[in-house]
Amino acid sequence: MGTRARFSQVTAGALAVFAAAAVVATWPLVLHPGRTIAGGLGDPLLNTTILAWDADRIRHLFRGLWDPPFLFPHRHTLAYSEHLLGIAIFTSPIAWISRNPILTYNVAYIGSYILAGFGMFLLARSLTGRVDAAILAALAFELTPYRLAQTTHVQVLMNGWMPIGLWALHNYFSTGARKWMLGFAAAFALVGLSNGYFFYFFAVPVLIVGSVEFAMTRLDRRQVLIDGAMAALLLIAIVGPIAWVYFRLQHDLGFVRTDEDLAGLSARAADYFRVSSGAWNWRGLLSVGGGERELFHGFVVLSFALLAAVVVRTRIVAMYVATAIAVVWLSMGPGGGPIYAWMFNHVPGFNGLRVPARFSAVAIVAFAVLAAVGFAWVLSRLPRAAGIAWAVAIGGIILLEGQHGVFVSTVPFAFERSWDRVTYEWLRTSPPGATLELNITQQDDFHPYTTTYQLESLRHRHPIVNGYSGFKSQLQEWLGGPASPLYEKGQLAETLDGLRAIGVRYVILHDATFPSQKDADALAQAIRSLPHEIAEEHRFGETWAWRLFDAAGVAQAFRPAPASEIDRRSLTVTVSHQRSRAELLTDGDLDTRWLSGDPQGGNEWIEVQLPRPTDVSGVSLVTAERSLYDYPRHLVIESVDADGKIATLFDGSVVSKLIEALAISERYPDITIPLPPNHATALRIRQTAESNRWWSVHELRLWRRDARETR
């Protein structure tokens, strides 16, 4: 047998070992991969939906990729989370053939283990020249307890591209062959397209390894710089259009994190010795962490990495010790020192990353490489038979430490016959229009039916208001919150009017999603009592389905061109409550607000004196995310003319207008109320209902009707 054939045979055998280890690690998932999922029905089911959506859009040449059918009416909601395109380009054929999104996700999930093992094997074998040491390092990387802690985040599990990228980078500096630089760029692109965090995180070992290799290389440095620049341009060409979508959302919607957001999601040194619930913890020696603070990678890999750092003096060890120190330090976030804070404030997009502790996914790359060197150092000093026995024993300990028996859940409605399936089939064959699914809850009040709604939306093809993602829809938060207008007395009709105005045409109510049948029946009967809203009604088993009457598309906030805003500096504003805050109504700062300070009692008012008699065409009450529940429950707007005559210009609810405003701007919804012709010297804006919420306004704007409008 030739050297090349033997090399290929060993590689294939190692791949088989890693595949077997993946099946064992994820057991019993392989028994029912088409209807069960590991890690619960939160993030895993979200990622299932995203991979299925990606597959569908790839088949349509990426048309409409950024607008999946959830979190309506917002645009680009795929970018509210990871897009997972680096995974989808491999799993899409499985989705097309099987038409089973759960199976597709499970292939990606189990495949992430195989990728990790095989990728580290290639890197470790290349650096140590030993197959046995490489297999041990690969198993330590593939079966790290940290993977169990990250079961719900398949994008984090895709760090197997990192050792492949480093393998290609080392080979480039060894040979100068451009195919290796191309391979490095491809691996970097794939790891970043699988997990946006990794574009930033993987750059750390790349910069360290690349800098040392460049300093020590015998290649023509000018040519290396040219090849590196070409690889960078290739990455920019691939990543640029995607990054632009995320950067634009950050700017337009304020999708950035604060130092406070990072505090509980940054690592501490002790977290590297904490495990997830259910993991092997050395009989209580290790404590169970929480959330993103379960960063233990195994005593074997840490011990042999330390051995290599102490006894082996090579360039490889120096590079990966430096990498380990850097990424562990950065995983501590702002608490680790000023470097992270500088990156947070100055590196574009970096302030959108909320979990510094996930640098641990890079730390295990460095630990495993160092452990490979440590394994090789020991094995080189043992007789062959003793070395085999020792390697088998160490492999067994790695397997024990990486005990991965995962918890699996059955996905609801997965290819089973149910009344919900009948309902969705009716919806699938109905005319276009968005859908509100009930019960609806806020994202932090998570229930599995929310992610099930998302998955089903790919089948019936109607966008839904509901959703679960990395960032929130304020419309869903408002409708699903404790003071939802769906349950406020007298506000349901206005809520449906507002939903119709933004394009919602269907309401589906699932009895089983409510805390009790009584709650479901109460809301269903309230909706049925509004026949002027309902064009069609069905009862499918325990599910209600309504088609609402059509509305004239998405309403726009009232801006009667060529109307103009009345200069706020010319207005004199007085208020019934919190008089010291009256000036905040017209200070031009959307983050300040006037508020009543007490629950709405029906006696709150704002009065605006105008500098001269004016035909006021509209009133805008600007609110903000933190004040969505503080809207006036019933509003009366009156004008007072020069003779003191009072005329009522508006008398009603503002809920429908708030829904329309949320469809346009979530950060600062603008409730704009058009007014009939008037000749006002003053406006009285009165809140006349009761609520346990106070009334707040971030900014008050008045609009003047241009004379041309009245001709």
Image (spheres, helix red, strand yellow):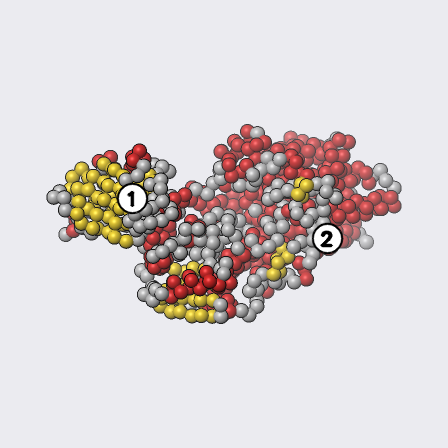
x, y (%) of residue 688?
28, 49
Q: How crowded is mark 1: few (under 14 residues within 10 Å), some or many (20 or more)?
A: many
Q: Residue at x 25, y 45 (%)?
A: 685
- Dot 2 or dot 1: first in sequence order is 2
x, y (%) of residue 65?
48, 55
Q: Check the image and report above or below for 217 versus 24.
A: above
Which mark is drawn over residue 303? none
Question: Is disc 2 placed on a helix, strand or loop?
Answer: helix
> Is residue 5 or residue 539 the one in the foreground?
539
Question: Is disc 1 placed on a helix, strand or loop?
Answer: strand
x, y (%) of residue 334?
55, 33
Residue that mark 1 sits on: 604
x, y (%) of residue 681?
17, 42
> How many labels were placed on the picture?
2
In the picture provided, is 638 more to the left or to the right than 95?
left
Q: What residue type is disc 2 on?
A: Ala
Which mark is drawn over residue 21? 2
Q: Residue at x 56, y 46 (%)?
A: 195
In the picture provided, is 550 more to the left or to the right than 63?
left
Q: What residue type is disc 1 on?
A: Glu
> Is residue 153 or residue 496 the one in the foreground?
496
